């Protein structure tokens, strides 16, 4: 079974200065996730002007350093699936921004 999903962008006027929008992944296909959505993703504008996608994460500290544990990770532990998803989200956002 292939899981179909779509992306929705939620504009916020009350968010932090560099927040472009919140992102929701909506699951549309028959299956265990039908009718569900994954929230907590966001698009941010960096100080350099580049757009970046963040996943839901929790922070933890080890000594004096802060680390992030992403809740959405690849099965095999490589970064490529996350990069592919982030790229797809940014492409969708750009295409909708151009159409608006």
Image (spheres, rainbow, N blue to C red):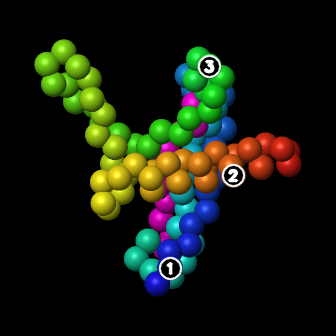
Structural crowding at the residue carrying mark 3, measured as other residues with C-alpha within 10 Å and reported as few (<14), some (14–19) or many (≥20) = few
Which residue lies under the disc numbered 3? Answer: 48
The disc at residue 2 is 1
In the visual, does 34 lie left or right of 44?
left
Residue at disc 1, secondary structure: loop
- N-term-proximal mark, 2 vs 3: 3
Magenta stretch: dominant secondary structure: strand
What segment is highlighted magenta in the picture? 34-44
Determine whether label 3 and label 1 are within 8 Å by CB: no
In the visual, does 72 lie left or right of 45?
left
- For image coordinates 53% across by 39% down, the residue present is 53
- N-term-proximal mark, 1 vs 2: 1
Give x and y (percent) for residue 11: 66, 38
Vertical placement of residue 79 versus 61, above or below: below
- For image coordinates 50% across by 74% down, the residue present is 3
Task: Answer whether residue 37 is magenta in the image.
Answer: yes
Give x and y (percent) for residue 32: 40, 77
């Amino acid at each position: 079974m292939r899981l179909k999903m779509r992306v929705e962008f939620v504009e916020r006027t009350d968010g932090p200065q560099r927040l472009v929008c919140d992102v929701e992944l909506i699951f549309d296909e028959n299956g265990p996730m039908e009718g569900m959505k994954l929230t907590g993703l966001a698009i941010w504008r960096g100080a350099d002007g580049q757009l970046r996608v963040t996943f839901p994460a929790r922070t933890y500290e080890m000594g004096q350093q802060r680390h992030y544990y992403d809740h959405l990770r690849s099965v095999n532990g490589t970064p490529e699936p996350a990069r592919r998803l982030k790229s797809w989200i940014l492409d969708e956002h750009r295409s909708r921004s151009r159409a608006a």
